[in-house]
Image (tube, grey):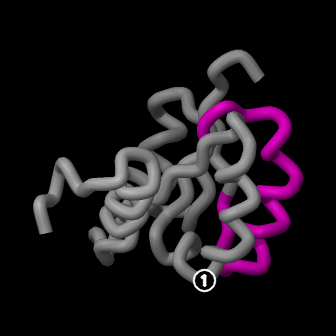
């Protein structure tokens, strides 16, 4: 594993990451994304997942919260942010710290 990075998402959204040396795994829907995540979870320290795929996989992704690796992070796709990644970050901070220190809402 040793710090390896991967991204799972639609082809257009992940191409720029490939140019930066990140392992890319195209997935056109949440079923394919779930299959890819199961297959690569043991091999990558950080896995980026586009928001459109992350939202329907919320329950599935909770299993990764209980392990130190991989860290699965939701990021915007080529279509822009839906706000889902920010929601997850806020929730994680509130769980860890008991208070919202970044968003102050």
Up-down relation of residue 97 to residue 104 (above or below): above
Q: Is residue 31 magenta?
A: yes
Q: Residue furthest top?
A: 2
Could you tell me which residue is drawn at 81 percent across and 33 percent down?
Answer: 43
Could you tell me which residue is drawn at 72 percent across and 34 percent down?
Answer: 44
* Snapshot quadrant of residue 88: bottom left
Would residue 30 appear left or right of 41 to someone viewing this image? left
Secondary structure at badge 1 equals helix
The residue where tag 1 is placed is: 56
Residue 35 is situated, as x and y percent measured from the top left of the image, at 84, 66
Q: Which residues are magenta?
A: 26-46
Could you tell me which residue is drawn at 57 percent across and 63 percent down?
Answer: 9
Up-down relation of residue 33 to residue 21 (above or below): below
Q: Residues within 10 Å of mark 1 (few under 14, many from 20)?
A: few
In what quadrant of the picture does the N terminus appear? top right
The one of 56 and 14 positioned closer to us in this rendering: 56
Q: Is residue 39 magenta?
A: yes
Residue 100 is situated, as x and y percent measured from the top left of the image, at 23, 56
Could you tell me which residue is drawn at 29 percent across and 73 percent down?
Answer: 83
């Amino acid at each position: 594993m040793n710090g390896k990075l991967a991204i799972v998402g639609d082809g257009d959204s992940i191409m720029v990451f490939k140019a930066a040396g990140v392992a890319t795994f195209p997935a056109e829907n949440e079923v394919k994304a779930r299959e890819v995540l199961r297959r690569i979870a043991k091999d990558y320290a950080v896995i980026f997942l586009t928001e459109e795929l992350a939202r329907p996989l919320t329950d599935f992704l909770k299993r990764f919260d209980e392990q130190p690796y991989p860290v699965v992070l939701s990021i915007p796709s080529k279509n822009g942010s839906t706000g889902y990644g920010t929601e997850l970050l806020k929730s994680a901070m509130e769980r860890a710290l008991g208070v919202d220190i970044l968003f102050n809402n």
